[in-house]
Amino acid sequence: MTYDVLTMGRISVDIYPNDIGVGLAEVSSFGKYLGGSPSNVAVAASRHGRRTAVVTRTGDDPFGEYLHRELDKFGVDDRFVTPVAGLQTPATFCAIMPETHEFPLYFYGRFPTAPDLQIKAEELDLDAIRGARIFWSTVTGLCQEPSRSAHIAAHEARPRTGLSEGQFTVLDLDYRPMFWDSEDAAREQVGRVLPHVTVAIGNEEECAVAVGHGTPDEQADRLLEAGVEIAVVKLGPEGVMAKTRSERVVSAPVPVQTLNGLGAGDSFGGAFCHGLLSGWPLAQVLDYANAAGAIVASRLSCADAMPTPAEVTSLLAERGRLVPEAVAQ
């Protein structure tokens, strides 16, 4: 099978409070959901009708079984998801305080390592990785061995010169400082895979880790100089910018009442992949992805909250934005 979107990296059980607006010490009940950025992106792309799979690892435990069931429920192929003996499936807790826009995360079962950081290069299906229309990975997957070598091997299997028209290699610049010794260490590893990347996505702080501090335009230009074809820089309350060698596009924010800001970026990513594969103009890809992210920000969970194309196009129309053709290519 050729996948539209094949992601690689983190998976976890998200434990989100049912009590909103208080710290974890005051929460009385929780709900559990599939989590982990690359896994959420696969779910998001699947919601848009794309054939998706994720390469990751769980513990050999009930939470691992739960994640397999959730992936199946969301239509994500789980054949590349296997257990790691002796390790537990990670859980991620968060507090949800929308009034102050605070959503602190607490990672359990990730230190000193986690199952999804035990992906080994020799275990990869390189044919599936080469054949995927979009291969999506994150900087976090580079933070530790053997995951680092596996990610590098996956990227080396997809050299830019070997990609066909309509194929993209995406790097999510999701720098999380608790997983790294320093920004310099992360920048060094990003530099090892960036020569294979055609699309880079991150906010200004993440782009600074990858290519240094500067204005968003300067950061985008540095990514383009490194060979990236599309540099996407998230601008916070000012929206998001995408830049190519011939085009610069800014998509204004799509205002919503924020409930949980976590997961919006993953929804953006899955919708962005859908727009790229649909061949839409870059401005429409950005608007569509922006709206998809806004919808998840207005909901409690991440994976379960990923919108359908009808929901995204409805929000775009409601906000007076151009609605792209919804037919997938």
Image (cartoon, helix red, strand yellow):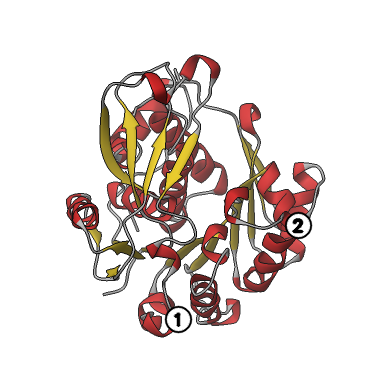
Q: Is residue 7 at all visible to an observer of this figure?
A: no
User: Type of residue at label 2?
Assistant: Val
For residue 135, what is the image quadrant? bottom left
CA neighbours of label 2 inside 10 A, class few (<14), some (14 to 19), many (20+): some
Quadrant that contains the N terminus: bottom left
| Residue 205 % position (x, y) | 69, 43
Specify the label residue 211 is tagged with. 2
In this rendering, position of residue 32 left or right of residue 265: left
Which residue is tagged 1? 121
Which residue occupies 34% across, 63% down? 87
User: With respect to residue 269, does 260 lie above or below?
Assistant: above
CA neighbours of label 1 inside 10 A, class few (<14), some (14 to 19), many (20+): some
In this rendering, position of residue 43 left or right of residue 230: left
| Residue 314 % position (x, y) | 34, 28
Disc 2, SS: helix
| Residue 152 % position (x, y) | 55, 76
Residues under labels 2 and 1: Cα distance? Answer: 26 Å
Which residue occupies 19% across, 54% down? 62
In this rendering, position of residue 234 left or right of residue 257: right
Q: Is residue 283 at all visible to an observer of this figure?
A: yes
Q: Work out which residue is located at the far bottom of the displayed protein and give it.
A: 122
- Asked if the residues shown at circle 2 and circle 1 are in contact, with their CB atoms under 8 angstroms apart, the answer is no
| Residue 11 % position (x, y) | 37, 55
User: Type of residue at label 1?
Assistant: Ala
Which residue occupies 21% across, 55% down? 75
Quadrant that contains the C terminus: bottom left
Q: Earlier in the sequence, mark 2 or mark 1?
A: 1
Which residue occupies 59% across, 81% down? 161
User: With respect to residue 239, does 185 lie above or below?
Assistant: below
Disc 1, SS: helix
